[in-house]
Amino acid sequence: MAGDITNLPAGSRLQGGKYKIIKVLGQGGFGITYLAEQTGLGMKVAIKEFFLKGSCQRDASTSEISIPVTDNKELVAKCQKKFKSEARKIASLNNDHIVNIIDIFDENGTSYYVMKYLRGGSLADKVQSGAMPERTALKVIHEVADALESIHSHGLLHLDIKPANILFDERDRAVLIDFGVSKYVDSQDDTTTTSSLVGFSRGFAPLEQVNATITSLTPATDLYALGATLYNLVVGMAPPEASQVMDSGLPEMPSGISDEVKNAVTVSMQPRKKDRPQDVRSFLDLLPEEKAADAGGDITIGVPDPQPEPSVPVKPKSGIPWKIVSAVLLCASLILGILLFTRKESDIPDLSGEVATLTTEKEDLQKQVDGLQGREKSLTQTNSSLRKQVDDLKGQVSTQNSRITTLQKENATLQRQVNEYKPKAERWDRSMNSR
């Protein structure tokens, strides 16, 4: 008998026990992603199951998936074929910043593909605490752009670029996942998508994707989402929806963000496709130089390299004892070391500019915190005022209810009096008429 469950329960096994389901990691309109164990190696993997929400149904006892509505079977079959062909395409890309697919198979009346499990969490998790330093954000954006360039070069559009679909591997590299709404570009001259199903994420999708009436999607659609992701990272807030950008433009960004980044976000989030960068290279050209975007390691003040000692001792020709020569050489080395370490202050790298930048970023963050706290206080006051109004209205309603009850009682009393005097009035009328 068919049950109400949609996902495989923990402990379920696939491929004759090769994979064991641990838990659900996430579920969208096109599939369910599980954390699982590859039992032979004892290795954690992620498994995505094709499950078209609203069209598929799972049998609780057998885990088999069926399509109850006959009219939906053609659509499900088409989407399942797309699910498998895109998995094979992604597996062939071989890019460090694209999720690594290691297996694909059919079972339970549906299809699955197996991915390397990424333990570093999502970009959405990292940005929850607020805006990122610009250099860190640009490092992530460069890595996602590298993935997008590879995807576009193979005739594919991702169409769901957002922080929740960017995970991090064990080396803290950004990895793009979830190709559930991706589309093929049919040819160099025709970008009509192979499916009419166009999903989107609010704030990260441009108008041509939100409206779902334009079937000609291009790389510029993905670049809008990449610009919106950059906005999210450096501002620390979700980007406005495409309709708001169309009507009012982008909100003013904090002063600590560089002009190049502000311009890159503004240009890539233009409402009209033709006004945006048309390929990844054009988008990257808007950003600061890559060396400036590289987060790099810790900054340290340079220390002179130690001077190599002679590999062969030099014997004195003048007959001076070797110990004296060694002592003289040691003193010379010490003097040289002192001279090197007491260089002029002007020779030491000046970090004041970087300190000033970090101070400005700190001040901007504090302003954001103060602003949010002010909004919280204002909302609290508004909430308190509304509660008082509600209480006042409740009091008025209670008073009105009491008045209604009193009037009802008075009305009942008057009605009784009318009923009592009505016979007397009739007798009086008859008496008067008889006279």
Image: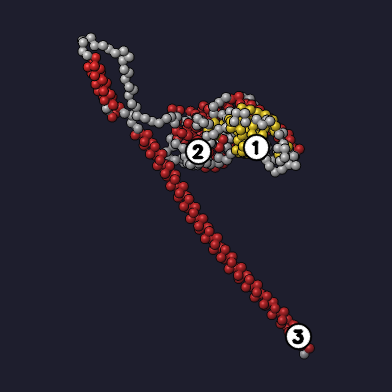
Amino acid tagged 1: Gly
Distance from disc 1 to disc 3, alpha carbons, whole Å, reads 92 Å
Amino acid tagged 3: Arg
Residue drawn at the location 73% of the way across and 83% of the way down: 425
Find the residue positioned furthest to the right.
434
Find the residue positioned furthest to the top.
317
Residue drawn at the location 47% of the way across and 32% of the way down: 138
Q: Position of residue 95 (x, y in %)?
A: 55, 26
Q: Which residue is mark 3?
A: 427
Residue 296 picture quarter: top left
Distance from disc 3 to disc 2, alpha carbons, whole Å, reads 92 Å
Amino acid tagged 2: Lys
Q: Which residue is mark 1?
A: 11
Find the residue positioned furthest to the bottom.
435
Which mark is first along the chain, 2 or 1? 1
Q: Position of residue 156 (x, y in %)?
A: 61, 28
Q: Please indicate whether residue 231 sits to the left or right of residue 350 in the image.
A: right
263 or 257: which is nearer to us? Answer: 257
Q: Residues within 10 Å of mark 2 (few under 14, many from 20)?
A: some
Q: Secondary structure at mark 1?
A: loop
Q: Secondary structure at mark 2?
A: helix
Q: Please indicate whether residue 1 sits to the left or right of residue 241 in the image.
A: right
Q: Please say whether residue 391 is visible from this viewpoint.
A: yes
Q: Which residue is mark 2?
A: 126
Q: Say if mark 1 contacts mark 2, CB within 8 Å.
A: no
Q: Residues within 10 Å of mark 3 (few under 14, many from 20)?
A: few
Residue 310 picture quarter: top left
Residue 2 picture quarter: top right
Residue drawn at the location 21% of the way across and 10% of the way down: 319
Q: Say if mark 3 contacts mark 2, CB within 8 Å.
A: no
